[in-house]
Image: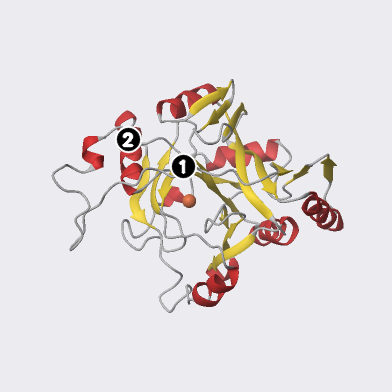
Amino acid sequence: MTLNALLDIELAVPNPAELMEFWERHGMQRTASNVLGTVDRPTQMTLREAPYRHLASMHLGCSEEKDLSDIAGRLREAGLEVTVAGTTLTCVDPVFGHRVVIDVTDPHPLTPGQARPFNAPGQRTRVDTRADAVLHTDPRPPRRIGHVVLGTPHTAKAVDFYVNLLGYRVSDSILNGLATFMRVESDHHNLMIQPGPTSYLNHYAVEVDDIDAVGLAGRAVVSERDDASVVGVGRHNLGANVFWYLRDPSGNMFEFFSDMDQILDDEVWARDFCKMDWEGADGPAGFSVWGPKDPPGVFFNPPDITAIAAGRVADGLD
Ligand SMILES: [Fe+2]
């Protein structure tokens, strides 16, 4: 049970060249003909063409070869096909249909971002100069892909696959188990499974340095397409990340985020935080602690959801 990294993802979209150019304009680097990376991580998103947009592959890391054989054993016991070649395991997600590839690898460290000096009552850390975000309005570049959120009518089966078979660790669960935040790293979530009208990619999330980076990066996207914003800026309750959700040229929702909760000690987290009554008398924890109170309807039902459902049927997926 020692998955240790979300390494990268593959997206299939009708217009990969347009999506490639979009992210090149917004701070990612083309590191191969169909691959986007960041300064620290040369492979973060691989793009390929498909009739409808979907997650095509999720690439994970684990600590040692024994982890691969343990995972392979659990998958086979559950009746799933799995291939192990050297230090790489490959299988197919039984709900969404994308490939899951797991490599034995060390987690890839990130170079710390340069902290901006903030002033606060009784604490003057920036004097006689304007704020960094005022002086440097070009957005800081994306640092990595931090998580994906998947919607599906088959939440229980999906959670079982990721938690019980692959070994994702649960950080929070709401809606009486219908929505589950889970991780393979210290981030509060590298994956969330939530209800959806069909099995689809709800969003992928791009980590940036801080709240100013979220704001500046989001504004740069909106300045190109003023209808690109879906919801933001705000701070989530669960994960605590600052968020701004936007739509890329392929119709995928993506999130610029920063400052997510980090979990190193499962026992402390489970004892002190998981037990918090997120279902609550007033319903489950809200979408945000500040910022927009609720997301718009398209957050859960994107405009192309019918095309995605039809594409899945054509591919023999339900
Ligand atoms: Fe997110």
Q: Read off the residue under disc 2.
A: 222
Q: Residue at x 47, y 30 (%)?
A: 28
Q: Position of residue 302 (x, y in %)?
A: 48, 44
Q: Residue furthest bottom?
A: 281
Q: Is residue 300 visible?
A: no
Which quarter of the figure has residue 192? bottom right
- 178 relative position to 235: left or right: right
Q: Read off the residue under disc 1.
A: 254
- 229 relative position to 161: left or right: left
Q: Residue at x 59, y 20 (%)?
A: 33
CA distance separating discs 2 and 1: 13 Å
Q: Amino acid at mark 1?
A: Phe
Q: Is mark 1 within 8 Å of ligand 1?
A: no
- 240 relative position to 204: left or right: left
Q: Amino acid at mark 2?
A: Val
Q: Position of residue 274 (x, y in %)?
A: 53, 72
Check whether the beta carbons of the residues at disc 2 and disc 1 lie within 8 A of each other.
no
